[in-house]
Amino acid sequence: MIKKEIQYSGRNLSLEVGRIARQANGSVVVTQGETVVFVAVCATKGDAEDKGFFPLSVDYREKMYASGKIPGGFFKREARPSEMEILAARLTDRPLRPLFPKGFFNETQVMINVLSYDGENSPDVLGTIGASAALAISDIPWNGPVASVHVGRIEGEIITSPTKTQMEESDYDIIVSGTEESIVMVEGEADFISEGELLEAIKVGHETIKDLIKLQKELVVEVGSEKREVTEIKENEELIGKVKALIDGKVSPLNDPKVKFQRYHDISEFKTSIIDQLKDEYPDDIGKIKTLIDDAITSDLRERTLNGTRADGRDTKTVRDISISTEILPRTHGSCLFTRGETQALAVATLGGKRDEQMLDNLDGLNYKPFMLHYNFPPYCVGEVRRMFSTSRREVGHGNLAERAVKKSLPSDEEFPYTIRVVSEVMESNGSSSMATVCASTLSLLDAGVPLKEPIAGVAMGLVMEDNQNYAILTDILGTEDHLGDMDFKVAGSKNGITAIQMDLKIDGLPYDLLKEALAQAKEARFHILDLMNDCLEKERPQLSQYAPKIMMSTLPVDIIGQFIGPSGKNIKQLCADYECEIDIAEDGKTNIFGTNQEKLDQVKAIVDSYSIKPVVGEIYSGKVDRIMDFGAFIDITPTISGLVHISALDWKRVEKVEDVIKVGDVVDVKLMEIDNMGRYNLSIKHLKEKPEGYEERPPRKDNKGGGGRTGDRHHSRKNQRKR
């Protein structure tokens, strides 16, 4: 067993090899604190044919035993991966994939298992470090190593690998992945930070990455395997020559500015015409012929782009035409159709109560999520036919990016205590549907009446680069430019700063000066989009949709919450059923009442408010007769306070029997006359009636003990009543 350790951010990180899973091509155990992540990598043996893509799969799984928990549900075992696990797998896949050599087509699998979790050290980036180390020591061809780190900032101090507790105080969480020489991926969220602050975070993260890669290299020296030779692709020079001869001078017109479907149609027709001329002679090389044609078209378009002419005719900084419509769906709480060029997203916002929160059962325990943004990418949005299965990893990743961008602008729970769900249906796609989702989601929330701190917009940036002197940074990239370019860089935020970022590179690295330029260009585009959004809907609607649940707020005294809820929730369940509402009570007594019927909401709020009433002498209250005694009636003036109306206080005239005036269950108005020194409430009904003309108080008569006695209006205190 070999173990390598490094100290950083005040904690120890170790890589261990040789004890677990020794039959895998490479396996590593990564430990930080008491978080333990195991990674194994395997690749098929022998030569593999070119399938048109590299068959790499990265799976990240969190075992519930890692935090001493038994999974919920009927089967009591881990089921399909959660969104969190999918996102963690993507965080590892994206920096690994570009570093596999061309010509290596063997199916490769990276499996990451969280075996122990201490609640403080994040296992997601440990998975990337472990995967890199496992690949580096294996015989699988790979141009690593890489490493990933979380970067946060607390009170102005930038820290790498912050703990979960520290991250709660941080104003950003940026995940940086890179090689020893350069950055290959950035992803994260922030509380409206500037472009300069983001750059500084990336630079600090890269310094830590260099130390982590040095550790991996030390491991490779001791236990690394000799890498397999990648079979050199033997080119059919004769076929290449014939294809070049047939397409010579015909490629450039295909890249003239045009709309997406016209471009794809023209290219498809062109390929078919070339294949028809060569298929009889080369029946087994149809795929290769298509690849040669695609490479020629891509090369020509990259050259055009570097010379200032993009695929749709725009210059490098122009954003495509934008059109926006809100309130387009009559029964939803908020909606927006956002169209940017040939990319279109329909976002729909729905408001709900506390019960609508998403419950997450993961290694951190049960958590509740009050804001959800779901992204759907159906096949019709790109004019294709495709079978629909479960939500794809891409949909999960794009939805999460948009969610992180928008959630930073949401109001606090105290200000707007709704559960919020936004669904983005991508109706058309030709580049950056995730950023269109950010814009559409923002406007759908404003349309629903959600008081956002600031509107959020997003834009995707691209890059075509031959060298550090010959490059073009592209604003608002097309799908074609994403495919042929060297960078996909998405930036979202308001006019006051960045809230989310995602950058993937297809090249070895990106100079910081060029990254700074890309951020500045993205900021200019974001401001332009925000201006157009503000022209449509500058702030939230003054009123919620008539179909949205209304909310009323009250407060219950903490000591009577249990009484209000009742045994096994009997009382609160009955209230919810009677008044068609939802009542949520926090531990501090803050109470939110949700419902759609305003009249019933007012009624149930009055009931809740009554629990907090502190009666004042001289005030009038409406109460229900609870009990009748010979000497008077007890009346509930609040759900927790009962007072006595003495028989002498029922009427100005003499009353023989209490039942002659009131009965159990009657609701009557009473006046609070006194709160005696024992804390008892003495009420009166007669003092709400007009005193009869000529009425005179009779003088009090002395009792047998010579004091106190009965007053002229026959009032007896309960104290004297008990004595008698």
Image (cartoon, helix red, strand yellow):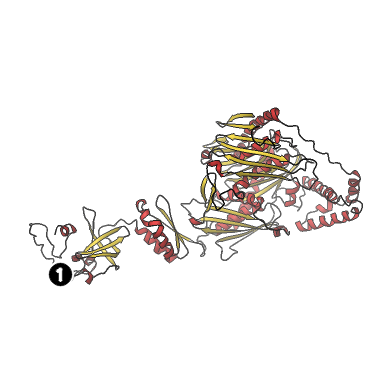
Is residue 191 found left or right of 508 in the rendered image? Answer: left
Is residue 36 found left or right of 698 in the rendered image? Answer: right
Position in image of residue 306 (x %, y %): 77, 45
Position in image of residue 361 (x %, y %): 54, 48
Q: To which quarter of the image does residue 129 belong?
A: top right
Inspect this view and state whether residue 259 appears.
no
Position in image of residue 383 (x %, y %): 73, 59
Q: Amino acid at mark 1?
A: Tyr
According to the image, label 1 marks what residue?
695
Q: To which quarter of the image does residue 663 belong?
A: bottom left
The total number of labels drawn is: 1
Position in image of residue 455 (x %, y %): 57, 52
Quadrant in which the N terminus is drawn: top right
Q: Secondary structure at mark 1?
A: loop
In the depicted structure, whether residue 203 falls above or below residue 417: above
Which one is in front, 643 or 304?
643
Which one is in front, 405 or 324?
405
Give me the residue at 60% from left, 54% from top. 374
In the depicted structure, whether residue 204 falls above or below residue 327: above
Is residue 300 found left or right of 150 in the rendered image? Answer: right
Inspect this view and state whether residue 607 appears.
yes
Quadrant in which the C terminus is drawn: bottom left
Which one is in front, 636 or 699?
636
| Label 1: few (<14), some (14–19) or many (≥20) C-alpha neighbours in 10 Å | few
